[in-house]
Amino acid sequence: MDNMNELNEEEMRIWNMWKGSYKRIFGRVVKDMSEQTGLSEGDFGVLDRLVQFGEGKLRQQELADSMDWDKSRLSHHLTRMEKRGLVQRKPLDTDRGVQINITPAGRSVLDEALPVVSTAIRKHFLALLTEQDMKSIIALAERTKAP
């Protein structure tokens, strides 16, 4: 290949296979979770991050950053979750920020969803991997981390 700015047919095929595999696996996990718990991918992402990164509470901007969502998208999603009793917004006294808290109902739904998600990840991804596959994925993930 003469031009390093272009992918050859094999490189493009590998790239498309990688993207397609990820989308299929992720889609199957989300489908299982949604069907069994009623949570959307976004709902789970919010609840899981509140617990994992903030012990049940995070500033709205920190939550948006962790999800790679813009403030408007997160705000609309939180409004829907708040109406369902899963989260609560609380203005912070110290500045103009807003803190997002998981409610007891939100924690209960998350607790029910976690084993469903674990089972789906195992079924649709981990069970298909050999030991060598796992080592290769780990090595690739390490090499592609941001500097």
Image (cartoon, rainbow, N blue to C red):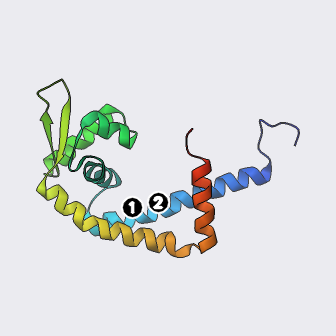
* Residue visible at 38% across and 73% down in the picture: 119
Provide residue 125's location: percent of width, then percent of height. 50, 69
Provide residue 9's location: percent of width, then percent of height. 79, 51
Classify residue 3 as left or right of residue 84.
right
Give the total of numbered labels: 2
Provide residue 93's location: percent of width, then percent of height. 11, 27
* Residue visible at 23% across and 65% down in the picture: 111
Question: What is the three-letter code of the residue carrying label 1?
Answer: Val
Classify residue 129 as left or right of residue 40.
right
The residue nearer to you, when weighing 34 against 52, is 52
Q: Quadrant of the C terminus?
A: top right
Classify residue 4 as left or right of residue 134.
right
Question: What is the three-letter code of the residue carrying label 2?
Answer: Phe
Mark-to-mark CA distance, 2 and 1: 6 Å
Q: Quadrant of residue 90?
A: top left
* Residue visible at 30% across and 32% down in the picture: 72
The residue nearer to you, when weighing 23 against 114, is 114
Is 69 drawn above or below residue 47 in the view shown? above
* Residue visible at 52% across and 62% down in the picture: 24
Secondary structure, mark 1, is helix
Which mark identifies residue 26? 2
The residue nearer to you, when weighing 114 against 32, is 114
Is 71 drawn above or below residue 102 in the view shown? above
Secondary structure, mark 2, is helix
Q: Quadrant of residue 20?
A: bottom right
Q: Quadrant of the N terminus?
A: top right
Classify residue 73 as left or right of residue 102.
right
State if disc 1 and disc 2 touch (CB < 8 Å). yes
Provide residue 14's location: percent of width, then percent of height. 70, 56
Q: Quadrant of residue 5?
A: top right
Q: Which residue is mark 1?
A: 30
Other-residue count near label 2 (Cα within 10 Å), few / some / many at <14 / 14–19 / ≥20: some
